[in-house]
Amino acid sequence: MKKLFYQPKDAWVGDLIPYWEDGTFYGFYLHDPRIKDKEYAEETTWHLVTTKDFVNLDYKGESIRRGADDRPNKNAYTGSVIKDSNGIYHAFYTAYNEKFKINGKSIQSVMQATGSDLEHLETMEDFLFVADGVLYEEFDWRDPFVFWNEEDGCYWMLLASRLKDSGALRGGCIALCKSKDLINWSYEKPFYAPQMYVTMECPEVFRMGEYWYLVYSTFSDCFTTHYRIAKSLDGPWMIPEDDVFDTRADYAIKTASDGEHRYAFGWIASKYGNCDFGPWEWGGTMVFHELVQDQATGALKVKVIPGVRDYYTKENEITQITSYNCELYKEKNAVDVMSQTLGAGLYEIPHDCFSIELDVHVEQAHEFGIALHVDKDMEQGYFLRMNPRKKEMAWDMWPRDHQGKYQWQIKGDVPYQIETARRLPEGTDYHILIIREEDICIVYINDEVVMSTRMYDHKDGYAGVYVVQGCVKISNFKLKIK
């Protein structure tokens, strides 16, 4: 059966390299077979899917072969694709072989594959571009993003790099190199060096209207994709109020535009052991969002793509709402949920493939949010916790771990899944869309914020809205299946 979220058979999706041309999006991605337990991105190559609507994907197979075990490109990692003035496509990618070392450290390098079409790219064996060892360290030199800079009259290459002789935890930078012919490159001063991160992976820049955007991913202060805003490529690069696109689960986001809309391409990380309590892994399942610009501030919001929103089409009739520790006041197409402590209005839901759309109006609440795959007694399940006092929301689950020897060993000192915390949109009215498919859950709030995660352990049960010491109104609750 066709799935909404793409993952190859017997492999996982790593970083995506998106490209658009003639009505088609090309989603190159790192194909990770996970050949050894708890080891990631070994024997990785580029594979390709194409799509016009982000729902129907066509798998095209391997697009860039990795090199032999004695070649620098034993593994082919992230990069970018560009078309030159002669109609030839150039894919710049990270080449890595742990056997190639300088001063005892394995180095990374950039290689290039070319072709007359996007489905057949062959590596240029004589092209190998390494860090200079003067401005930049040799062992962090990856994720080349190449674009034509009209003002400068040459190609620019941005790379995830490290300042020479810098600290291991704050020396990450985005390197800049320039070329007239895509072959010979000069080393320039860093494009962006905030002295904040271990590294800044998958860098890219793009322009929307009067603003330039710098996008990069980092696992330093938090595991996420950030963006910065400027009026020119010279900066200064300003940090927006909410500077991320999604949660920790959706990493290494890169973008592409069809000239009218811009879309985010990322992957929802799996968890080890396919269980809620397992650690996050590298690689997972492909996911797409649409990015929308606030023209007044330049801020980027995230909304659902129409085809994704409409994937589930058959509406299930909702005939009954179950109360948990609350008073329910029913109206036409709406119900008020009121509780002096923790209360919830709950609806029975299918196993794991469905969408829910609803509106929530907050009359008053210490805390409120979405309960998902919970039982009637709210003893277990998932919770999208929305805290208006802290202006914060985050995914949580209960219990947070298997109980230890003692009753209190249930991770009650962990407030929620910290790595999924986001800023709560201001206001009292929230339009919420929940999309579930197998172990993936994505929630869109007010067409401006997205919260993605994995859900392994709880299925079926109930979904609804909870409130802590307050009153919320649920309206227009719609449950759809395929």
Image: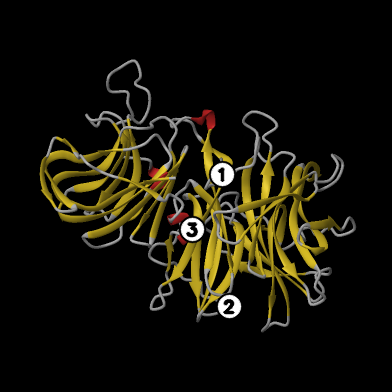
Q: Earlier in the sequence, mark 2 or mark 1?
A: 1
The amino acid on which the numbered mark 1 sits, given as a three-letter code, is Lys
The amino acid on which the numbered mark 2 sits, given as a three-letter code, is Asp
Q: Does residue 149 appear in the picture of this structure?
A: yes
User: In this figure, which residue is indicated by the disc labeled 2?
Assistant: 234
User: In this figure, which residue is indicated by the disc labeled 1?
Assistant: 2
Give whichever of 199, 152 is nearer the camera: 152
The amino acid on which the numbered mark 3 sits, given as a three-letter code, is Gly
Residue 300 sits in which quadrant? bottom left
Query: Compared with residue 76, is residue 151 higher up or lower down, i.e. above or below?
Result: below
Give whichever of 453, 408 is nearer the camera: 453
Q: CA distance from mark 2 to mark 3?
A: 37 Å
Q: Residue at x 66, y 84 (%)?
A: 151
Q: Earlier in the sequence, mark 3 or mark 1?
A: 1
The N terminus is located in which quarter?
Answer: top right
Q: Earlier in the sequence, mark 2 or mark 3?
A: 2
Query: Compared with residue 301, is residue 288 higher up or lower down, i.e. above or below?
Result: above
Image position of 281 (left or right of 148): left
Whole-percent x, y for residue 366 in the image: 17, 48
Image position of 321 (left or right of 349): left
Q: Residue at x 38, y 43 (%)?
A: 418
Secondary structure at badge 3 equals: helix
Mark 1: few/some/many CA within 10 Å (<14, 14-19, 20+): few
The C terminus is located in which quarter?
Answer: top left
Q: CA distance from mark 3 to mark 1?
A: 14 Å
Q: Residue at x 41, y 51 (%)?
A: 313
User: In this figure, which residue is indicated by the disc labeled 3?
Assistant: 307
Mark 2: few/some/many CA within 10 Å (<14, 14-19, 20+): few
Query: Mark 2, mark 3: which one is toward the viewer?
Result: 3
